Each structure stands twice: as C-alpha cells, then as structure tokens.
Image (cartoon, helix red, strand yellow):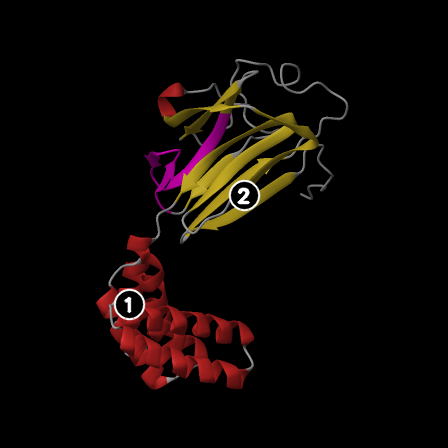
C-alpha cells in the first residue's frame, strides 16, 4: 500500500545538541500562530499541553543530566507543559504515548519544574532550541507568540571524559594527538596536572608542534615549574613564528613576560 506523503500543518522538527559529551535530542512538531491567540486561547492556561502539535514533544538524554539543579536519568521523556500567564510547569514524563491519544498519567512524571515567563518580540512558529552554551551546560527554551520559558541542562563532562582518556591511552596505538588532547583537557579542567604534564611531554617527544609545545609550557607552569615553562614557551614562540601563527606568537610572548616577572619578584 502506498501512503501519500503530504505537507503537515505543523511540520516535524528535530533539534540536537551535544552538552559536554552528552547528546540531547528534542523531537517535536512546529505549529504556527496564523493570526490566532495562542496562550490563554488556543493553548489554555492551567491545562496539560503536549508542548507542540501532532503527537507532541519528546526529549532524549544519552546520559544522565541535571535539570535546573535536579538529576534526571538517561532516557526518552515526553516533554509536557502546563502554561500559565506568569509561569509554566515543565514536566518530564516516562510515557511513550502522546496525551493526544492517552490520558495524562502523573504517576509517570520523573521531574516537574516551574519556570517564569519571559516576554519577547512576537514569534510566529513554535520553536524549541538551545542557547547559552558552555562547556558542560546549555539553556533549552520554548518560544512562541510573545512568550519564552527556559531551563538549564547540565551534563558534567569531567568524569566521563577522564574515563574516555584512560581508555584511549590504554590502547597500544595511542597517538601523539591522543596524548596532547588528554593533556590539554586536564589543563583546562585543572585535574591530574602532574600526569597531564607527562602526557604533554610524550606528545611533544613524538610529534612536536607549536601548539603542543605551548600546552607543554602551560603544564610546566601549572606544576610550578616556571623555568621549564619559559623554556618551552620560547620554543613554541619560535615554532609559531616559523609557522606564521601570529596569535600564538603573542600568546607565548605574553606568558614569557608573565613568568619571567614572577621569577624576578
């Protein structure tokens, strides 16, 4: 049997975002206002809304995350909301059935949070998206008509990343790039600094590059080895000049001045 594919009044959409090392995916339909009053009209206040049209909205977390300070396990959840004029309640529900076809089952709620409403310039089409991205967090927002609500999704990446590093470096074919990336990550997070220094040394010994030597210099400094840090920075400086990377030239020059000043003080 041939099923004719026809345009939908509320087209399907998917938005995906990696937060830390965790993939987050939202699947939903996108209705448009089309001159209608939305909140307090088409979408009544104080009633459970499937947060879109058609079958509703679903969010999937690849790994556990923290929503506005509360942990939620990995998995797929129906993303339900109860809009009101000044605030919305956002509900993460374990059901795999749309409330369009089955009654809302409050016993399946995993998390319920109340969020303030932000007034925004008019938006014609319902939108779910991510913004305010940081290393381990992002804001997920709903926006339609003149209303926006949002919450924070945190996916702390340090512990999982360290496990990934250990697995990668345990392999017999670990590369200079693997060692550099591991060292740079630990430098950025301020963890395993003595071990990260050894990884940086291995990387530079195997395949010296202007940026890997700079990482080495920063790890010497992070381990309170300022003379070694200056020496490595000077090496990176000359390599950066030869490679034509003026930004790294300036970065190295600045660090050399800083560390030399600290040795004199």
SS type, badge 2: strand
Q: Which residue is mark 1?
A: 265
C-alpha distance separating marks 2 and 1: 44 Å
Residue 197 position, x and y percent, is 27, 72
Q: Are marks 2 and 1 in contact (CB under 8 Å)?
A: no
Please give the label number shown on residue 131.
2
Is residue 72 in the magenta section? yes
Residue 92 on image: x %, y %: 42, 30
Asked if the magenta segment contains residue 120, the reply would be no
* Dominant secondary structure (helix, strand or loop) of the stretch shown in magenta: strand
The magenta segment: 63-80
Looking at this rendering, what residue extends furthest in the left direction?
A: 194
Residue 65: give x, y in percent of width and height: 37, 41
Quarter where residue 31 is shown:
top right
Left or right position of 250 against 165: right
Total numbered circles: 2
Q: Earlier in the sequence, mark 2 or mark 1?
A: 2
């Amino acid at each position: 049997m041939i099923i004719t594919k026809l345009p939908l009044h509320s087209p399907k959409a998917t938005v995906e975002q990696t937060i830390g090392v965790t993939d987050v995916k939202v699947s939903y339909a996108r209705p448009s206002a089309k001159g209608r009053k939305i909140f307090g009209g088409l979408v009544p206040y104080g009633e459970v809304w499937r947060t879109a049209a058609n079958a509703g909205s679903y969010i999937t977390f690849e790994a556990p995350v923290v929503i506005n300070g509360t942990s939620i396990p990995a998995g797929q959840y129906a993303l339900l909301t109860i809009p009101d004029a000044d605030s919305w309640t956002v509900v993460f529900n374990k059901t795999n059935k749309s409330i369009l076809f089955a009654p809302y089952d409050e016993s399946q709620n995993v998390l319920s949070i109340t969020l303030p409403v932000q007034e925004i310039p008019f938006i014609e089409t319902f939108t779910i998206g991510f913004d305010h991205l940081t290393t381990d967090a992002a804001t997920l927002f709903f926006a339609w008509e003149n209303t926006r609500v949002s919450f924070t999704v945190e996916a702390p990446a340090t512990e999982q990343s360290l496990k990934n590093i250990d697995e990668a470096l345990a392999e017999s074919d670990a590369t200079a790039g693997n060692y550099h990336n591991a060292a740079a990550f630990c430098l950025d997070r301020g963890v395993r600094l003595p071990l990260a220094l050894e990884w940086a040394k291995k990387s530079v010994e195997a395949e010296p590059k202007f940026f890997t030597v700079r990482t080495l210099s920063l790890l010497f400094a992070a381990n309170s080895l300022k003379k070694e840090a200056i020496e490595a920075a000077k090496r990176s400086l000359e390599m950066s000049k030869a490679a034509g990377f003026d930004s790294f030239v300036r970065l190295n020059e600045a660090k050399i001045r800083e560390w030399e000043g600290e040795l004199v003080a």
